[in-house]
Amino acid sequence: MKLARTLVWIGFVLFAPSARANLIYVLNSGDATISLIDSVTRTEIRRIPALREPHHLTLTPDGRDLLIADSGGNELFVMDPATAEVRRRVRVSNPYHLAYSPDGKFLVVASLRRNQVDIYDARDLSLLQRLRVGDKPSHIAFDPESRMAYVTLQGVRSVVAIDLATRQPAWQAEVGREPAGITWVRGRLLVGVMGESHFAVLNPETRQVERQIPIGRGAHTIFPSPDGSVLYGTSRVDSRIIAINPETLEITHSYEVPGGPDCIAFDPEGRIWVTLRWVQRVGILDPRTGDLETIRVGRSPHGVFVQPVRGE
Amino acid sequence: MIDAIYSTYAAFIGWLYTAGLQPALYAMGLMNYADDLYQWLDFAVFGLVGIVVSWVVCRPLEAANPVERWPDRGAVHTDMIYTILARVGILPLLAFVLLNGAQRWLDGTIAYTGFVPPTLETLFPLLREYPLLALACYVVILDFGEYWRHRFQHRFGWWWALHSVHHAQTQMTFWTDDRNHILDDVLAALWFGALALLIGVPVGQFPVILLILRLAESLSHANIRTSYGRVGERLIVSPRFHRAHHGVFSVGQSGKNYGVLLPVWDWMFGTADFRRDHYPETGDPSAPEGMAKGGWLRQQVLGVRRLAQVLVGRG
């Protein structure tokens, strides 16, 4: 079976259209599958069974492996991002969101359902520290020097800063109701305040919210474009994507994206791939024209990743 | 065709959530539960579909070839309330609201011991390649667990006091499947939770199969004079097989046919009754009248009263 699948895959790679095509990974958290999409044909070319509930994913610092976190299955899938072959699986307690520290030393994993944050050694994924934190640790960000990991605590309106040297919480600051996504932007933390309608701009030095960026009800998460020139934020209730100037933090554009836009990934052509959490689709938004196309995927699609794979 | 049904269903759930439930959650300050309640909505709508499918399949069969006919179906109406509460997810939602924090604390505590709950697929990696086979394995193991839970419901007096709410029904129909005391449902959830800690929870990406399994359970309670034949009776629990379990002489510890989906467990453990012409009257003669004919709340109260009587030694 595995041999047959590999042969089919090799055949597909060899005989696929020569046009430049990217491989898009969409994690269907509601039905435990991973959709693989061809960006040229805009079709789902394969659906890979996960274990229970895959939510988020990240590349290893060297770019060799794609880590897919299956929270309900207590596993990390280590995949070859170019071929989607599973290289190995690692038993991990309820991995929901995960991110490598910028220095590549640590993998930090937030467990939404167990109120814990785990710090793993990035080299061998051995557990270095398990921290019991406040209610519903959700998303993770780092400062560029890898001194701190910042984790939103959805149930207690806060962000907790974890000192990566001592591997202990250093401080905690309140940011608003149900904080979700978090991103480091030029010395500030931008936090999607899901229970409200703005991103909070948190100064990690003063630990105060300095300002709010109004984006719409259910402000969720923020992704910088690959060149860092634009920040894109999602609002899941008002269903829109907002473009923000990272220098001024002013809104420069708003795109209506029905279906509850959640996670974002960018393809080399500058398009935005966004999971539409509540309508079982992934959207392809061209930010230059505002054109939006959608493709059907599995239930409750969440994490998304673009791998430039063919015709390069 | 199936693809179109899935697409329509997805669009409908999406519309319900984005136009109705999510804005309401936002307004009430409950966005913390946005993901959970999306799953609940899916569960509830799927539950409604399940009720409709059961009704479409079972009701004509009950009308065409009933074991019993009743001039007054008042007791059946009470069972409808049980079904709606259970399958539309009102009771699961209530349990989620009440137990969610405790669940996370328990999960976190278990994780702190270093124990990472396995799944069948981690124990038997071959199953990863065959999700349908994995689902089949889960169904068999969980059904085995259900068989023993069911036996214990009849074996222990205090548990029988609660389970007798299910058995008190003298007008058994396909609606009776979900007629359970709330505390009995809580115990069932704990039982399932313990099993899930050992083998994980089953994959959920085969909704049609789950619908068929649920239909089979409804059908087993249906008021239909039918058996599945000499072989079929040994493969899956039939209306005839399960009616024998609900018979008036099969209550408490004298029970037979405990299997929920697969009769093989009764066969293996010597509790099977495969007489294919045996369609007894149902009910629990020792239960108070209100437990059979009363409304939902009265049955719940009587269940607790019966439990208290057993616990103080007067039951």
Image (cartoon, coloured by chain):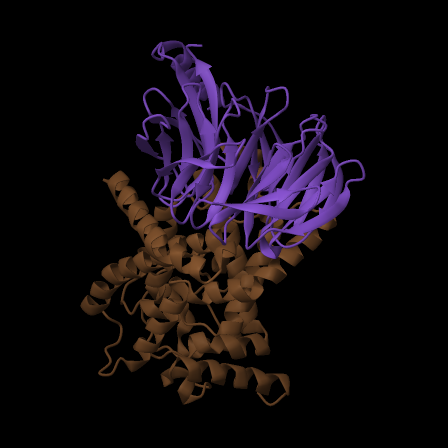
Chain colours: A purple, B brown
- Residue at (50% x, 25% y) in the render: A229
Q: Residue furthest left?
A: B64
Question: Up-down: is B193 above or below A137?
Answer: below
Residue A282 position within the rendered picture, expressed as x and y whole percent measured from the top left: 38, 35
Q: Residue A128 lies in what quarter of the image?
A: top right
Horizontal relation, residue B29 to residue B51: left or right: right
Horizontal relation, residue B223 to residue A104: left or right: left
Please tell me which residue lies in front, A209 or B199.
Answer: A209
Let me know if residue B130 appears in the view: no
Please tell me which residue lies in front, A230 or B93.
Answer: A230
Q: Residue B132 lies in what quarter of the image?
A: top left
Let me know if residue B40 appears in the view: yes
- Residue at (48% x, 21% y) in the render: A307
- Residue at (48% x, 29% y) in the render: A230
Question: Up-down: is B97 above or below B139?
Answer: below
Horizontal relation, residue B295 to residue A102: left or right: left
Question: Up-down: is A307 above or below B234?
Answer: above
- Residue at (36% x, 70% y) in the render: B176
The quarter of the picture where the N terminus of chain B appears is top left
